[in-house]
Image (tube, helix red, strand yellow):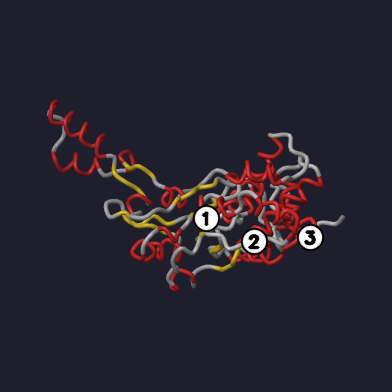
Amino acid sequence: MTANPTSIDAVETLLAGQNYVASRALATVVFLSLKLGRPLFLEGEAGVGKTEIAKAIATGLGRRLIRLQCYEGLDASSAVAEWNFAAQMIAIRTAEATGAGDRDALRTELFTEDYLIERPLLAAMRPQPGGAPVLLIDELDRTDEPFEAFLLEALSDFQVTIPELGTIRAPEPPIVILTSNRTREVHDALKRRCLYHWVDFPDFARELAILHARAPEASESLSREVVAFVQALRREDLFKRPGVAETIDWAKCLLALDVVQLSPEVISDTLGAILKYQDDIQKLQGSEAARLLDTVRRDVLPA
């Protein structure tokens, strides 16, 4: 286990050690979150590195990463704990067959830790060998308001309540990171319990540094072309703009094809690595890809 960083510079170094190139603003809010023990709420477009920040922090600090992947219909039992009904039924049938024990004792025995299936929120409240874990509550905007209300207890007091067992409180609060792609607004009551940061698309220099860190085998010239082209794509009228994750994926695809320089033909053949909607792909087919590439080479990349 590594001690929490004691400065913003130390946070930048910690993240860089995990090939995560953070902006100064993001490093600052991460430092404050760790120092103050406050949950960190990250919003931004998909693919800009919100989930990766939690992974980088967990690995850098030597902590366990516990991920709660949110989805529509997620409820408290699925997030905290569920009773193992199959095992409970077997225990009941066994007791009935052998005539062992009275009913009250059996009922008490059935609702113990032995029959509890631990889910992410409960796991995050448990002591961990390497210190408090990193709890990633990913894509919170996919859930509904009742689940947000349930989270208020967990994030305010770092505790969860199981009716049959009572309240379980974390001996050491977990490092909590929540992410949202902002497909809907998250309630203010939840946001107020967190430090907030909008994770934006990086500028050219930082995205190039990210690509160097994640795909170091790519040449400097190819990396610059890839980053410049993706950044130009984001200025186009697209249904879904490509994120940094798509930049990295595209570069790796180009390397797998032994591409050393972009061309309209290569771009058309590999658009599926950076664009995920057919309407967007159709806009960039043929002459449009050539036009955009010419613009990039003329206005962005040095001769």
Q: 4 or 49: nearer the eye? A: 49
The crowd level at tag 3 (other Cα within 10 Å; few <14, some 14-19, many 20+) is: some
Image height check: is 226 above or below 195? above
Give residue 293's position: percent from left, percent from top: 73, 53
Label drawn at residue 23: none
- The amino acid on which the numbered mark 3 sits, given as a three-letter code, is Val
Lateral position of residue 195 relative to residue 264, left or right: left
- The amino acid on which the numbered mark 1 sits, given as a three-letter code, is Pro
- The amino acid on which the numbered mark 2 sits, given as a three-letter code, is Phe
Q: Residue at x 42, y 57 (%)?
A: 169
Residue linked to disc 3: 300
Label drawn at residue 201: 2
Give residue 220's position: percent from left, percent from top: 81, 46
From the viewer's perspective, is the residue at label 2 or at label 3 nearer?
A: 3
Q: Are marks 2 and 3 in contact (CB under 8 Å)?
A: no
Q: What is the secondary structure assignment of the residue under circle 3? A: loop
Q: Earlier in the sequence, mark 2 or mark 1?
A: 1
The quadrant where residue 28 appears = bottom right
Q: What is the secondary structure assignment of the residue under circle 2? A: loop
Residue linked to disc 1: 174
Give residue 157's position: percent from left, percent from top: 44, 64
Q: CA distance from mark 2 to mark 1?
A: 28 Å
Q: Residue at x 52, y 68 (%)?
A: 194
Image height check: is 219 above or below 121? above
Q: CA distance from mark 2 to mark 3?
A: 17 Å
